[in-house]
Image (spheres, rainbow, N blue to C red):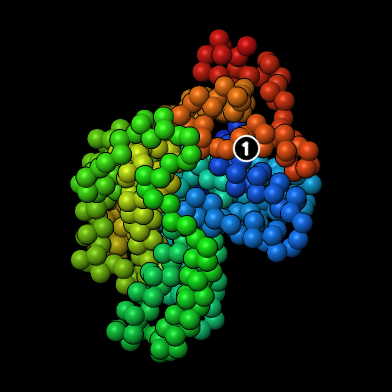
Amino acid sequence: MAINRYSLLALIVLPLILYYSTLGFYVLDIPKADDYGDSLRTFIDIKQADDLKTKSQIFFKQHVDHRTSVSRSVYFISLALFNRIDYSILIFVGNAALLIIVLVIYRCLTLSASKPVVVAYMIPVTYLVFQPSAYVSMFWAMAALSNYLVMLWALLCFYFLTRHTTGGVFLSLLCAGLASFTQGNGIGCLGIGLFYLLLSKKYKTDPRVNLHIGLWLIVSAVIVAAFSWGFHLRAPMEFPQGSEALAAHFKLEQSPLEVVHWMVAIFGSAVAHGSLSVATIVGVIVVGVLGTFLRAGIYRLHPALSLYVLFILLSVSMVAVLRSDFFTIQISQSPRYTFYSSQLLAVLAAVGSHYLLVRSNGKATGMAVFILGVSILVSGASYFGNMGKIREQQYRVLNGMWLWNSKARKNPYAPLVANPGATLVDAKKAGIYTPPPLTYLPKDQWGRFAIGKSDAK
């Protein structure tokens, strides 16, 4: 029995070791894309502001379609502790949210099954969550902080809400507020939470539901008002000034069917390795599994995780609708968004294994083992298929800081980052961030980032 327990723990811990070792090996203290505006330019402007009111307005200002105050708080802590913004640390902080997410999933599962049994369910969860299909978000400070932290706040929001206590409702609202000011989709926690409370009233599962609904409505109104104050909703086809080349580069009109296709493809993106056909097939299977779980009433056994799945679906819908006029369907396979798929698959794998074993009185072990094996296979394939892409991505960042120089203004993507070169100069003068030299590593080590030896000159 002890051997089995230790073997299970080893299987669970192995993907964590691989994931964070890969992160530590390739992490770079270099800003990317939105990092220039959301962290560097924001704190340069704060430092140059004359009064506290102006500083606070800059800190809470809108970034594209989001309020990123939580991420900026992490930047501020880095600045206070290290006297500079350290992007390698920020990237680790963002990715650490995945570990807490997995721990909360474990806690949610233990509410419906005994702990020794749940340990086995956690194996597919860790292999599906801790794999590098979303390597762009994985190594991008702003994306890691916003994408992963908003998922953590959402999961905690639903965990506390389903405890059916007044204290739990307050904690749930706190997490919903944090989610709303981490990334735009976080505000969806408020609607999902209200939906759950209304269901609790209908089915009489919460003895103080009227009080909790009242608290939810009042605090939600405050959060929405704070989020909306001075908010400018960017039109889907509204491009930055001077980016005519970018507007012409993309297809600007997509049918509703293409938007639905995008959503379905995102569901399978974590296992598709950029293949739209594979992603669509897997996405259709996921939709079928979700429909089966809905008809079987499995959401009653795992309310918090069911609300989390609903939040993932809402987030994917928001991405598909808001980005549908901005990008083509192919962007659904971008390694920026595959974390939605990996977490959705992880939750479905754990809940599905539990459901199969309970329904069959423990006889469906073969299917549970199959799910476990597929999860391990998916993780291994992700490393095999993406390590070269990670090396190429980090080498490009290392050797040219994404080539944000005067010549890069000819690139159609350049207008998405306002004056990156000037921002770096101002950040250095303000003592906020000093770019590392392009010879960030000794030349004899450059080869590990290069696809071929010819790149490491």
In the rendering, at what x and y percent does residue 137 appear? 50, 42
Res. 47 in view = yes
Q: Relative to 254, does residue 213 appear above or below in the rendering? A: below
Q: Secondary structure at mark 1?
A: loop
The image quadrant where one finds the C terminus is: top right
Q: Nearer the viewer, residue 424 or 361?
A: 424
**CA neighbours of label 1 inside 10 A, class few (<14), some (14 to 19), many (20+):** many
Amino acid carrying label 1: it is: Pro
> How many circles with numbers are drawn on the protein?
1
Location of residue 147 in the rendering, given as x and y in whole percent from the top left corner? 50, 50
In the rendered image, residue 126, in percent from the top left (x then y), is placed at 47, 49
55 to 176, vertically: above or below: above
Q: Residue at x 31, y 57 (%)?
A: 352
Q: Is 349 situated left or right of 92 in this image? A: left
- The residue lying at 72 percent from left, 25 percent from top is 437
Q: Which residue is mark 1?
A: 31
Position of residue 184 measured from the top left corner of the image (x, y, whole percent): 47, 57
Q: Is residue 302 left or right of residue 425?
A: left
Q: Can you say whether 396 is above or below 246 in the image?
A: above
* One can see residue 172 in this view: no
